Image (spheres, grey):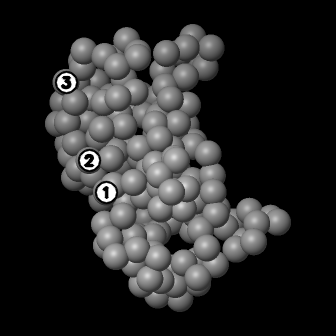
Amino acid sequence: MIICVGSKNPVKVSAVKEVIGDYFLRDSALYGVEVDSGVSKEPMSLEETVNGAANRARKAFEMQYCDYGFGIESGLMPVPMSRSGYVDICACMIFDGFRTSLGLSCAFEFPQLVIDIIKKDKVDANEAFFRSGLTDDKELGYGSGAIGLLTNGRVTRIDYTKQAIQMALIQVEKRALYL
């Protein structure tokens, strides 16, 4: 089988590679392909985040012959009673040419300062964390991610990305239950 991930971000590609090792997809060839998510640099709702993941999955599937397209998108969504008004979440969409399967990760809050920069300057989380002075890494999302920074490495971006992938694979592995 062939799997195309709608990104060349090594965290996203590695997360898929690690997760599929536990599934029937373990012997698949895996390729990361650069695609446009079709959403904002920093999605600001669950709908926009899921749409970004879906766009990545479909575009990856269409770019070259593959059995599954995986789209992974992180973004913010409004959540009542959160201090900043938003939490960050990762969505994974898997597309097989006919059906989609969705999975989501755990969610966590960014500091208010970061949210304010994202909203005011319309930048992604990498840039907002950099501008806030919380990191000197302009490519935070290509490594441990904001969650790695905020948890002192206890939970990394690959960890939370893998959660979304595992949740999406439920519908792939148990296809008969999700008609």
Which is closer to the viewer, label 3 or label 2? 2
- In this figure, which residue is indicated by the disc labeled 2? 10
SS of the residue under disc 3? strand
Q: Is residue 66 above or below residue 108?
A: above
Secondary structure beneath dot 2 equals helix
Report whether 146 appears left or right of 67. right
Compute the Cα span from label 3 to label 1.
Answer: 22 Å
Mark toward the start of the polypeptide (3 vs 2): 2
- Amino acid at the residue labelled 2: Pro
What element does badge 1 sit on? helix
The correct choice, above or below, for 15 with respect to 80 in the image is: above
- At 74% across and 62% down in the image, what residue appears? 79
Q: Position of residue 22 (x, y in %)?
A: 40, 17
Quarter of the picture containing the C terminus is top right
Q: Residues within 10 Å of mark 2 (few under 14, many from 20)?
A: some
Amino acid type at circle 3 is Ala
* Mark before the other along the chain sequence, 2 or 1: 2
| Residue position marked by numbered label 3 in the rendering | 29
